[in-house]
Image (tube, rainbow, N blue to C red):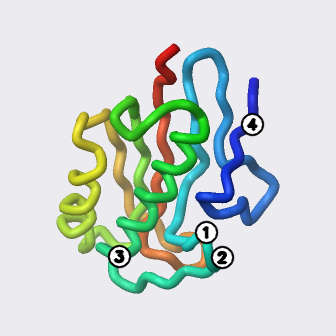
């Protein structure tokens, strides 16, 4: 088991890793819309936050030796299911391979963001 860390994605804000690699799979922690350069949530709309989340996931997966194209499963958390369509518009630009997915609305997310996404991906060896 290997821990993944990149400065191109936000540091963990708790006792967890950005991702863990085991065998040929990478399991990411949930990513929120923190800009890794500033350490702050700068985006305010669901579209802007989803863009940042996808960029963060891409950075973690790249560091792990994988990619968004190799994602096989995502779990998506929205603070408001009314944002589902707008979230999907941005999500679909990044996850073109159409991985399996769960998407649920939750009461509150860390730092009061609108979206969080975690992923499982294959590492090509």
Q: Secondary structure at mark 4?
A: strand
Q: Nearer the viewer, mark 3 or mark 1?
A: 1
Q: Secondary structure at mark 1?
A: loop
Kindly identify which residue carries mark 3. 48
| Mark 3 vs mark 2, CA separation in Å | 16 Å
Q: In the picture provided, is 34 more to the left or to the right than 6?
A: left
Q: Does 60 sit above or below residue 44?
A: above
Q: Residues within 10 Å of mark 2 (few under 14, many from 20)?
A: few
- On the image, which quarter does residue 64 sit in? top right
| Mark 3 vs mark 4, CA separation in Å | 28 Å
Residue in the picture at 81% in, 55% down: 15
Q: Residues within 10 Å of mark 3 (few under 14, many from 20)?
A: some
The x and y percentages for residue 69 are: 34, 34
Q: In the picture provided, is 86 more to the left or to the right than 22?
A: left
Kindly identify which residue carries mark 2. 39
Compare residues 5 and 92 and report the one nearer the observer.
5
| Mark 2 vs mark 1, CA separation in Å | 5 Å
| Mark 3 vs mark 1, CA separation in Å | 15 Å
Kindly identify which residue carries mark 1. 36
Q: Earlier in the sequence, mark 3 or mark 2?
A: 2
Kindly identify which residue carries mark 4. 3
Q: Residues within 10 Å of mark 4 (few under 14, many from 20)?
A: some
| Mark 4 vs mark 2, CA separation in Å | 21 Å
Per the rendering, the mark at residue 8 is none
């Amino acid at each position: 088991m290997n821990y993944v860390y990149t400065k191109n994605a936000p540091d963990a804000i708790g006792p967890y890793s950005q991702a863990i690699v085991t065998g040929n799979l990478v399991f990411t922690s949930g990513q929120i819309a923190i800009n890794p350069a500033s350490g702050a949530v700068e985006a305010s709309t669901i579209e802007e936050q989803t863009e940042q989340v996808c960029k963060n996931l891409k950075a973690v997966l790249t560091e792990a030796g994988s990619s968004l194209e190799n994602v096989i499963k995502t779990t998506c958390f929205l603070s408001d299911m009314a944002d589902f369509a707008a979230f999907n518009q941005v999500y679909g630009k990044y996850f073109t391979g159409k991985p399996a997915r769960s998407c649920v609305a939750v009461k509150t997310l860390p730092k009061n963001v609108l979206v969080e996404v975690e992923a499982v991906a294959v590492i090509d060896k």
